[in-house]
Image (cartoon, rainbow, N blue to C red):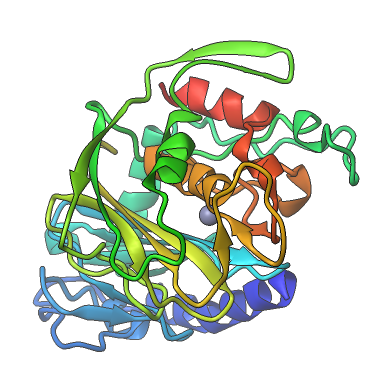
Amino acid sequence: MRTSSKAAAAVALGFVLTAVFAAPGIAGAPNCRGDSISVHDLASGCHGGSGVIALDDGRTFAVPAAGVTLTAAPVAEGDTDPGDVVIANRGAAGIAVQVDEVWAGSPTAVRQERAAQQRRTLGATIRGTVSHGGATTSASCGSKAYVLTGAHWESPVRWRYNPSGAKVSNVAAIQRGAEAWTGTITACGQTVRSTAAQEYLGTATQKPAVTADGGCGTSNRTSVIGWGKLPSKTLALTCIWSFTDGVAFETDQRYSTSHRWGSTSTCSGNRFDLRGIATHEWGHSYGLGHTAQKSGLVMKPSSTVCDTAQRTLGLGDVRGIAALY
Ligand SMILES: [Zn+2]
């Protein structure tokens, strides 16, 4: 369940946090090495540009290069929500980790990254309320909420598609998802002009840097979208790499090969709608975070089969993209 898994994560990291702020300074801190660096290890202020961080929940993340912040945003089925993860390599200050709202890792890096995140999002994270919700088709027009991750692009997102293992072969559905956020957008009676931009460069043989345990691999400066294994309830996962100033330089997306997908105009059967989920993933790629599930917006964290409404931006979604671009 969504709430309980969040609570569990908070409990798990809560212990680490207490330990973190009692930790000594970073002078003489060791390098972070190995393929299973724990968040507790990071509390020592260790630094380095290699190795793999393993969260208590089993997700693993290749340590991003110094000066790079990695954001991982999953979308899950039903009412599950594994939680967003941020890993910021602050160089000599060490590495900060954020799971949902809970920070851990090097205390100095946490302090620096929290301040940087506030600057990057311009204090614009608006966790608005649902003025009229429920199971109506206009639910997504009842919420003005949007969340900025702090990442944004100053150039078009140039991306490639790897069809290997595709459960439904339709790159056009993914492209439609990308285009939902660009140009002149009218939704819920509001029209905005978005400068968000993307360019599809064709197919790739390389895999997206997303791991089967629901984490992110090593950035290679090429944005790739493709298919592969993910944790059982996770439908798709987007990883974004950005510099300390928030300018993104790579985004990779992986769609789960363990689920049934559809890409027809009217979805039917027990299939997840590729275009709808892709619209959500592209929201992450451009720099939007999750809103509350009850918002009914494209950026809600969980989805259900044939949720074709997720192809269309809601009020908070258009406000969010307009705030960013
Ligand atoms: Zn998501």
Name the residue located 55 percent from the left edge and 40 percent from the top edge: 147
Examine the image and state in which quarter residue 302 appears. bottom right
Examine the image and state in which quarter residue 80 appears. bottom right
- x, y (%) of residue 193? 48, 11
From this view, report whether residue 230 is shown above or below residue 150. below
Query: Quadrant where the C terminus lies?
Result: top left
- x, y (%) of residue 255? 43, 63
- x, y (%) of residue 172? 41, 41
Name the residue located 25 percent from the left edge and 28 percent from the top edge: 156
Name the residue located 17 percent from the left edge and 59 percent from the top edge: 219
Q: Can residue 244 be seen in this view?
A: no
> Horizontally, is 129 left or right of 226 in the view?
right
- x, y (%) of residue 214? 42, 74
Examine the image and state in which quarter residue 2 appears. bottom right
Query: Quadrant where the N terminus lies?
Result: bottom right
Name the residue located 84 percent from the left edge and 36 percent from the top edge: 137
> Horizontally, is 120 left or right of 92 in the view?
right
